[in-house]
């Protein structure tokens, strides 16, 4: 395929367009975020331009295929920034959290010292669903798949020594997102840091929990209220913090295809904007703060196309459905994590190869931040060495591969552009089905999303069993002596007792009068319509625990019960 460098284009009209883009979009961005190097060269000394485009006389471009456009310009097929990684790399954000806050803090410090740019916190199941570690429902789960957090003191210990105004903090939390965000705000106040300086993201995406993951507590309607309360609070008090990360990651992990991942994620995002609008919030303002979270799976080119298609589809949907024309609001910003469901316990070192390919697809697809899974995650919580290697994988891609030296280097490739169009078209069709059912909430209530995901997961499993889909080390190239080792990082059995004792001490030292007043005020507000976030912040500041807040809210909202879907 013939391409032309950005300068010296033979077509005067296209040359003018590129020059205008360079002057109006590209150069202003380089002034805001200067390029990493004065000159970009290949290993042979060949200059690398910021952008490459089709030659009109190449004979490869399909006349029916839309122009992919230019980076930094809606609909952002080629990236949301004109300079992309020539100016700065994506945020290298490793997901971590296990056992106690103290142990996780040590891992955070280690990762930051190794060049990580932001923290991504994994919480244990009791924290995710809203039970304190001394509750009967927490039995056997405290600290197992993430860190146990119940109080402001816990979060203070978790983030001990972490400068809240300088380190971006992402929290994978949904049903209890409002409480964890309130804890972070309260911690900033405790340390004398302005909440307005906090940077990061709270996942706060409950719809995909009902459809694919299962860490819910309250029914759909009050859960949507909590989400819009976070939107409103963040809009007023947290100008640098993303109040939601609409997640396709867990939808994909449950067995969805790339098309389903895009369609259901964007359909959920539309439902959140509908809810924000119904709550009296300005859609354009909320859209500017929306972020997304996608999976990077194995089919390299489809994954690159998926990211490009999602950007374009979202930019167009905001105009079509909400009349949003502001380009910053239409720019789909997303975090990526490599696919945990593709990791194998057999021949686990092969996972390094899988993760590298997936991470490269995310980078070539234009991600804004990235987590790379560790090679041993199918066996246990990641070891220190495996987590470091996962981070080094990103650093090699960033500094050694050369793929970051020009914007959207696969743009214009007939295969990639065709796949981008096809993923977008199929995702749009599926979104229309969701819309016809009344939106994501109704699509989940009726079981439509769940059935679609389950059917896809079944097809994939059958393909593995029949060897139509090869998984190296599992159904092909198997080694007889390959026996996965036992879990090497077991959580101490005494942790739950330790956490219960800490919680008892916490309750003993707090002011019971202030606690009772805060809880009574929260219950009263939950029965009305006011924004609950300020009251939740007040509650955690006087020592009310996460479990107590959820119990109080449940007394008003009720508890969600999963419907059996066939």
Image (tube, grey):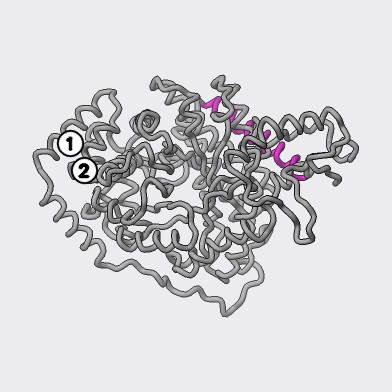
Q: Quadrant of residue 216?
A: top left
Q: Nearer the viewer, residue 310 or 550?
A: 310
Secondary structure at badge 2 equals helix
Q: Is residue 454 visible?
A: no
Could you classify mark 1 by the number of other residues whose Cα lies within 10 Å: few (under 14), some (14-19), or many (20 or more)?
many
Q: Are marks 1 and 2 in contact (CB under 8 Å)?
A: yes
Residue pictured at 79% horizontal, 29% vertical? 16
Tell me: residue 48, above or below residue 25.
below
Could you classify mark 2 by the number of other residues whose Cα lies within 10 Å: few (under 14), some (14-19), or many (20 or more)?
some
Residue furthest to the bottom: 481
- Circle number at residue 44: none
Q: Quadrant of residue 204?
A: top left
Secondary structure mostly seen in magenta is helix
Q: Residue 56 placed where, x, y %?
A: 87, 35
Residue pictured at 85% horizontal, 46% vertical? 1
Residue pictured at 70% horizontal, 47% vertical? 406
Disc 1 target residue: 519
Marks 1 and 2, how far apart in space? 8 Å
Q: Quadrant of residue 238?
A: top left
Q: How many numbered badges does the structure rendering display?
A: 2
Disc 2 target residue: 548
Q: Is residue 185 visible?
A: yes
Q: Residue 325 placed where, x, y %?
A: 58, 22
Sequence-wise first label, 1 or 2: 1
Tell me: residue 546, above or below residue 530.
below
Q: Residue 546 placed where, x, y %?
A: 25, 45
């Amino acid at each position: 395929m013939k391409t032309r460098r950005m300068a010296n284009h033979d077509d005067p009209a296209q040359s003018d367009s590129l020059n205008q883009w360079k002057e109006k979009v590209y150069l202003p961005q380089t002034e805001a975020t200067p390029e990493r190097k004065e000159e970009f060269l290949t290993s042979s000394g060949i200059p690398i331009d910021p952008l490459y485009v089709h030659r009109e006389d190449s004979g490869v471009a399909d006349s029916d295929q839309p122009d992919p456009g230019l980076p930094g310009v809606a609909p952002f097929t080629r990236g949301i920034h004109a300079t992309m990684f020539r100016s700065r790399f994506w945020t290298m954000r490793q997901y971590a959290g296990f056992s106690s806050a103290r142990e996780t803090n040590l891992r955070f410090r280690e990762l930051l010292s190794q060049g990580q740019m932001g923290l991504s916190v994994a919480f244990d199941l009791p924290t995710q669903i809203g039970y304190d570690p001394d509750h009967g429902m927490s039995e056997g789960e405290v600290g197992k798949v993430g860190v146990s957090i119940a109080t402001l003191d816990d979060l203070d210990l978790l983030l001990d020594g972490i400068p809240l105004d300088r380190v971006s903090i992402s929290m994978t939390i949904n049903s209890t997102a409002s409480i964890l965000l309130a804890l972070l705000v309260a911690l900033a106040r405790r340390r004398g840091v302005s909440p307005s300086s906090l940077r990061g993201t709270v996942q706060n995406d409950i719809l995909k929990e009902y459809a694919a993951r299962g860490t819910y507590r309250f029914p759909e309607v009050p859960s949507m209220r909590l989400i819009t309360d976070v939107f409103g609070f963040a809009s007023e008090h947290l100008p640098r913090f993303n109040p939601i990360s609409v997640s396709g990651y867990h939808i994909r992990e449950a067995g969805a295809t790339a098309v389903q991942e895009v369609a259901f994620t964007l359909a959920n995002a539309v439902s959140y904007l509908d809810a924000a609008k119904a709550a009296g919030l300005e859609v354009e303002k909320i859209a500017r703060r929306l972020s997304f979270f996608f999976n990077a799976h194995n089919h390299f080119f489809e994954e690159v196309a998926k990211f490009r298609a999602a950007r374009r589809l979202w930019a167009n949907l905001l105009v079509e459905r909400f009349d949003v024309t502001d380009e910053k609001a239409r720019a789909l910003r997303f975090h990526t994590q490599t696919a945990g469901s593709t990791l194998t316990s057999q021949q686990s070192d092969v996972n390094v190869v899988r993760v590298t390919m997936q991470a490269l697809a995310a980078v070539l697809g234009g991600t804004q931040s990235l987590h790379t899974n560790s090679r041993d995650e199918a066996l246990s919580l990641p070891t220190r060495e495996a987590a470091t290697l996962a981070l080094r994988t990103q650093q090699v891609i960033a500094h050694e591969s050369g793929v970051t030296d020009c914007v959207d280097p696969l743009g214009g490739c007939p295969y990639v552009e065709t796949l981008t169009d096809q993923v977008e078209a199929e995702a749009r069709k599926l979104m229309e089905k969701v819309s016809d059912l009344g939106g994501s909430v109704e699509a989940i209530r009726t079981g439509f999303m769940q059935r679609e995901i389950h059917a896809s997961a079944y097809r994939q499993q059958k393909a593995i069993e029949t060897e139509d889909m090869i998984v190296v080390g599992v159904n092909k190239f198997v080694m007889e002596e390959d026996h996965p080792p036992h879990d090497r990082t077991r959580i101490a059995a005494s942790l739950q007792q330790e956490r219960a004792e800490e919680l008892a001490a916490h309750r003993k030292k707090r002011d019971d009068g202030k606690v009772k007043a805060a809880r009574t005020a929260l219950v009263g507000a939950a029965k009305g319509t006011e924004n609950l976030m300020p009251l939740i912040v007040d509650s955690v500041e006087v020592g009310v625990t996460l479990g107590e807040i959820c119990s109080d809210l449940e007394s008003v909202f009720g508890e969600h019960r999963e419907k059996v879907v066939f």
